Amino acid sequence: MVTKVFIEISGFLFLLIIVLLILASARYGYEIFSELNPEMQMERISENPKKFRTGTVLVISEHVVIITLAATLFIAFSSYNIILGVVWLISRGVEGLIQIYNKKNYWSLLDIAKQYSAKTTIEREALNESVLNILNSKNSTFSIAQILFSIGTLAYSVLFAVYSVIPVYIGWFGIAASIIYGFGNGVARMKPDSKALWNLGGLLIWIFELVLGGWLLLSSLLP
């Protein structure tokens, strides 16, 4: 009974992550991978600081949910293979933690935006450098976090495929999606203009997590 509860909680958390990201990006303009344009970013934040705060809070909440999901999946499925369980627990847990830690720097863009309009051109150039450093750090942290994401996703996908605890085609789809996404991320890190494979992997990951989350949430109702 306990395992069943954590399976359903895990399904809910997968879907919650998707909802939080869609809300943050589509409704509140949060950029998952920020455009490196300090002046544009400062103007955008100054025009609607509340929107920036809300989008960032939603994403921080998503990171917390990721850590929680890693734990609930571990409780629900690690008995099948403790090594794979530890791999995804550490990978996805660290993924969430480093992104939460980085958001304190990203949040400081609010304070910089308040100063920006009152500064001279020379002073703005100095602020632009600070903003650019923050945005580069955010993008770099996200890219590293996605390597950990790929490892964690691959770990529980392998477990699902090998031990048939869910329909095996979902597990194998997750294996393919996580490999494509991880490889695409590596290509994009070496060649920033080559993101087609990463984007394809991202689409496959969204489909995988939507199907997996729905199946886990409704598992007690499915044959």
Image (spheres, rainbow, N blue to C red):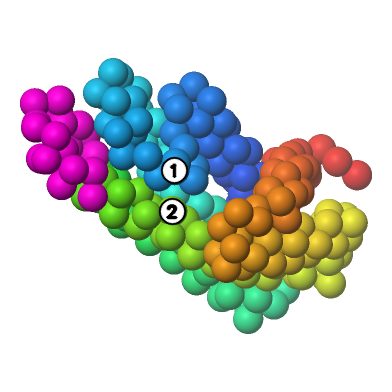
- Write the residue at 62% across / 45% down: 14
Along the line of sight, the residue nearer the viewer: 220 or 73: 73
Q: Is residue 131 visible?
A: yes
Q: Total of numbered circles in the picture?
A: 2
Q: Give the residue at x 44% y 43%.
A: 34
Query: Which quadrant holds residue 154?
Result: bottom right
What amino acid type is highlighted by mark number 2?
Answer: Asn
Look at the image and give the residue range highlighted in magenta: 108-129
- The residue sitting at 86% across, 41% down in the picture is 222
Q: Nearer the viewer, residue 48 or 50?
A: 48
* Residue projecting furthest to the top: 47
Direction front: furthest residue: 122
- Tag 2's secondary structure? helix
- Estimate the spatial distance between the alpha carbons at disc 2 and disc 1, rounded to whole Å: 6 Å
Determine which of the numbered discs, if any, sits on residue 34 in the image. 1
| Amino acid under disc 1 | Ser
Which one is in front, 174 or 164? Answer: 174
Q: Is 107 left or right of 142, judged from the image as shown?
A: left
Please tell me which residue is depicted at 37% across the width and 54% down the height of the picture: 136
Please say if the residues under marks 2 and 1 sit with CB atoms less than 8 Å apart. yes
Label 2 belongs to which residue?
Answer: 139
